Image (spheres, rainbow, N blue to C red):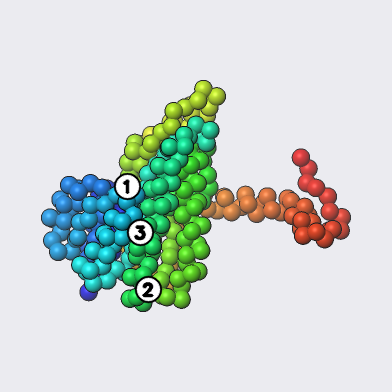
Amino acid sequence: MGKVWFITGASRGFGRCWAEAAVARGDRVAVAARSEAALRAFADDSGDAVLPLPLDITDRAAVFAAVQRAHAHFGRLDVVVNNAGVGHIGCVEEVTEHEARAVIETNILGTLAVTQAALPLLRAQGGGHLIQVSSSGGIEAYAGMGLYCATKWAVEGMSEALAEEVASFGIRVTVLEPGGYATGWFSAARRSASYPAYAPLHDLLDPTLTPDSLPPPEATVPAVLALVDSVDPPRRLPLGSFALRAAVEAGERRLDGVSAWDAVIRAADGIPAKNATPPPH
């Protein structure tokens, strides 16, 4: 018998196409999303292979109940995909406290709730695979998306620590880092009111937020299926050439910065380095 998946944000985009691919190959899937109608239509077409679970991941009690229900229904959970999240566009100064809390509540605390709900079940059954969906914005931060990127960096840091904590239980953790795909993210993203001071930045940014040539989310299916079938999955997996380029360039920038300030960094040990001179301004 195939794997059992639990996927949040499964009404459209990545979540929906991954769920469809899992069912098509004989796996069973608990699909969770706020849109009950979209889930029901999918379940009606897929029979007993799909369990639809209407869910708002900001409702912690509902998250725990949904994960427990999925586990009881199928008898186990092999792959838990934290895909639900919200996009946000706005310069850091423009973001209101209410907007910041809303994106943090969903992208960080919602992901945390699903993770914490699943872990005891995975530990008791002796293993499983947690897939945390981040973004190329979790690799490098983009002007005009500071709060969104901050939540993805938080998910990556949490997941990196989590992977160390649960490895001995047979639980694997992978952070997915997709680049841009035609998932509807750009049209659905929440936006802060813009400040005149940032008008030039928005004039440059806005045309990039209405892409017309992004690959479809279905293009990620082979990579995701290969990931869940791997006996040694990676901690991080960029998806697409844009995300791969972001990972390579971000790593190179960090190494270059460290190298340029090597003497100053080492002097911070409190032991004077020979011939240490600060880098040029």
Q: Does the image show residue 28?
A: yes
- Rounded to the nearest angstrom, the CA distance separating label 1 from label 2 is 35 Å
Quadrant that contains the N terminus: bottom left
Q: Are marks 1 and 3 in contact (CB under 8 Å)?
A: no
How far apart are labels 3 and 2 at the CA level? 14 Å
- How packed mark 2 is, by other alpha carbons closer than 10 Å (few <14, some 14-19, many 20 or more), is some
For badge 1, the amino acid type reads Pro
**Which residue is farthest right?**
275
Q: Amino acid at mark 3?
A: Val
| Left or right relative to 46: residue 146 | right
Residue shown at 47%/65% (left/top)?
162
Residue 199, image x, y percentages:
51, 24
Question: In the image, is residue 206 above or below residue 162?
Answer: above
Q: Which residue is mark 1?
A: 216
Front disc: 1 or 2: 2
- The three-letter amino acid code for the residue at tag 2 is Arg
Q: Nearer the viewer, mark 1 or mark 3?
A: 3
Q: Can you see residue 25?
A: no
Determine whether, in the image, residue 75 is placed left or right of residue 199.
left
